[in-house]
Image (cartoon, grey):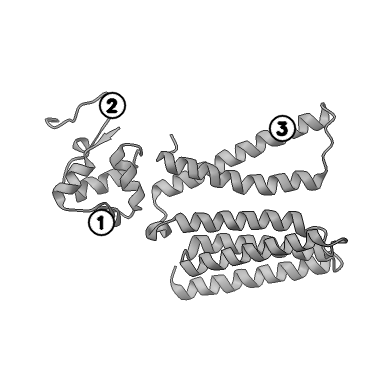
Amino acid sequence: MYTRIKELRARCGLTQAELAEQVGVRRETIVFLEKGKYNPSLRLAIQISVILKTPINEIFYFDDEFPQKDVNP
Amino acid sequence: MNKSALITLEIIISCLVLMFIIGTFYASGFYYDALLWTLLVAVGFGALYLLKKHNTPEVRRVIAIIAVIVLSISFGTILLDVPLLPATPGMGFTMSMILILLHWRMKRQGSDAGIQDERSLRIGTYGISCSWYLTYVLVIFLSVAISFGGMQISANTVLLVFIIMMPVSTILFQYYFNQKGDVY
């Protein structure tokens, strides 16, 4: 799994600790999320997407996917 | 839970532990080993409770001091020709190792260690599950070895192995998953 959390977090001017505090998790969890080593729950993914003001499918994507920037339902 | 409710709960738990210790002492016919074993188990539970609720440098120091005291008593008892409390060395070593491991683990945790987020809960649960499976495999191995292999092992040794193995393997599994990032 890949994530764009690091990039989007930097864009929002948030540190790992600040993002962790806002979503109610430990900073370590954000570290592993950014490395793509941790699969978050749907609740956490939604919380992150709300704080980073970006749709979930633009934050998380899997090995067999490309970043879905142009997804139109 | 608010602070006064937490303090009430702590007092109730302490009273129950104290009653249990006194009860065990009386039930065993004033047998000091029973008292010591129960006290050490109570110390272990107390340390685990502190680890969960109040992870501060002071608490870490207290746990380390208790571990050193228990270890010293264990060494002291071993040096005696006729140990006053025969159960002391084995149980003491086990408990002090667990306390030292707890202290080390608490020391490694950061300021946000008190937060039980989904990842730490998942790793905690999975670590305990793996430890349970390992214990189960060991029970099967021991039962086969004793029943068919003619292995001779005392109940005390088996208990000691489980007392050491279960918490240590849980901590090691949790450490491994924590380094890995996730349980999958």
Element type where label 2 sits in the image:
loop
Rendered residue at 54%/44% (across/down):
B172
Query: How far apart are the alpha carbons under marks 2 and 1?
Result: 28 Å
Towards the viewer: B138 or B7:
B138
Check disc 1 and report the residue beneath it.
A18
* Image quarter in which the C terminus of chain B is found: top left
Q: Quick check: marks 2 and 1 in contact, CB under 8 Å? A: no
- Image spot of residue A45 (x, y percent): 28, 43
Q: Quick check: marks 3 and 2 in contact, CB under 8 Å? A: no
* Chain for numbered disc 3: B
Query: How far apart are the alpha carbons under marks 1 and 3?
Result: 48 Å
* Amino acid type at mark 1: Glu
Instruction: State left or right for residue B146 relative to residue A70.
Output: right
- Image spot of residue A54 (x, y percent): 16, 43
Instruction: State left or right for residue B45 relative to residue B177.
Output: right
In the rendering, which numbered label is found on residue A63?
Answer: 2
* Amino acid type at mark 3: Ile
**Of the image marks 2 and 1, the number of the one nearer the N terminus:** 1
Quarter of the figure with residue A69: top left
Label 1 neighbour load within 10 Å: few <14, some 14-19, many 20+: few
Check disc 3 and report the residue beneath it.
B140
Rendered residue at 57%/64% (across/down):
B63
Query: How far apart are the alpha carbons under marks 3 and 2?
Result: 41 Å
* Chain for numbered disc 1: A
Instruction: State left or right for residue B183 relative to residue A1.
Output: right
* Image quarter in which the N terminus of chain B is found: bottom left
Rendered residue at 80%/62% (across/down):
B33
Q: Do the dots labelled 1 and 3 sit on one chain? A: no
